[in-house]
Amino acid sequence: MTLHGPRAVVTGAATGIGQAIAVVLARNGADVATIDLADIAETSSLVAAEGRELLHTEGDTGDPVVVETHADAAVDRWGGIDIWVNNAARLLVKPLVETDDEDWHDLLAANLHGYFYGCRAAGRRMVVAGEGGRIVNLSSAADILAVAGLGAYIAAKGAVVGLTKTLAVELAPHSITVNALAPGATDTVMNQTAYTPAVRRTYEDRIPLGRIGSPDEVADAALFLASHESRYVTGHELVVDGGLTINGSVGHARN
């Protein structure tokens, strides 16, 4: 893939999908700026091993000041931003009727507000630069195939898709594409507790490809959306789920 440009931001890149995206972008020629509350040392080493620079801001993407400060730092260091990937998120597994106000607002801060702040920061700077750009928002296959107990999470991810489509139309005249990337079941640190052995067996039965995905497989799809090759794709939600959300098979008997 040929990246749209060599200056990328990836939020939530300490582990999992975000880390894999940061590394694959670095492998294809991008310096990477990250925002994360967690230790970024491993990602920094992996990016450096690809011969690229990592610029890190420690902070919460749910804070607009942190996001704006980080965007300014990336522009100051590299002269602009070509690619912005909103990935930072957290998981809450709780029935909606048991979800209190604090749960709800904390979840939306990370999984929705941070995406708005990131899109706004990226869009403003890309428009001013006049060189086009790529914005990629991590949504989820759960906004297609609803999962009980993930009400707040799915509400946020569904809103991210709406935000993506609207922004895609608004920024298209500036040659900026905006797409969503929807992972299905993926082995990440965030999912370690939720994916019990029983959950894993169910996924393996339900996913047509027969296994839970890896962060690298999601990152490869992000690479495409960040590349020149995706130049005519915008406002799209690319689902990377091994076929889970299309599988309606329930074991009908032959007749």
Image: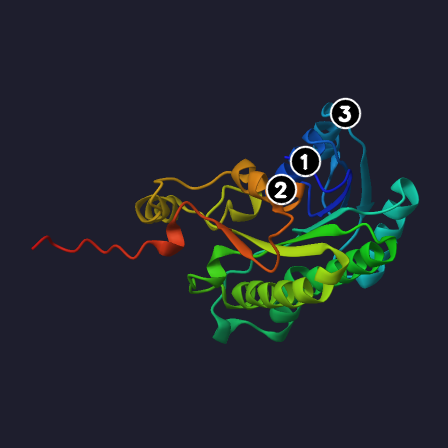
Secondary-structure class at tag 1: loop
Query: Three-letter amino acid code at disc 2?
Result: Glu
Q: Nearer the viewer, residue 227 or 9?
A: 227
Q: Quadrant of residue 125?
A: bottom right
Examine the rendering and report whether any part of residue 46 can be seen.
yes
Q: Residues within 10 Å of mark 2 (few under 14, many from 20)?
A: some
Determine the residue positioned at 66% across, 57% down: 178
Left or right, 235 with respect to 247, comes to right
Instruction: Give percent across and percent down for residue 232.
Output: 62, 52
Q: Is residue 245 left or right of residue 121?
A: left
- x 47%, y 59%: residue: 142
Q: Image point 62% across, 40% down: which residue?
A: 223
Nearest the camera: 85 or 175? 175
Q: Which mark is residue 229?
A: 2
- Dot 3, how many residues are within 10 Å of its Cα: few (below 14), some (14-19), or many (20+)? some
Q: Residue 169: where, in percent of width, then height?
A: 67, 66
- Residue 62: image quadrant is bottom right
Q: CA distance from mark 3 to mark 2?
A: 23 Å
Q: Amino acid at mark 3?
A: Gly
In the displayed structure, 194 sits above or below 94; it is: above
Which residue is disc 3 drawn over?
51
**Marks 1 and 3, how far apart at CA:** 17 Å
Q: How is the image coloured?
A: rainbow
User: Of marks 1 and 2, which one's residue comes earlier in the chain?
Assistant: 1
**Which one is earlier in the sequence, the residue at label 3 or at label 2?**
3
Counting labels gives 3
Q: Is residue 40 above or below residue 70?
A: above
Residue 39 position by quadrant: top right
Between 248 and 92, the one lying in front of the other is 248
Where is mark 1, residue-wise? 2
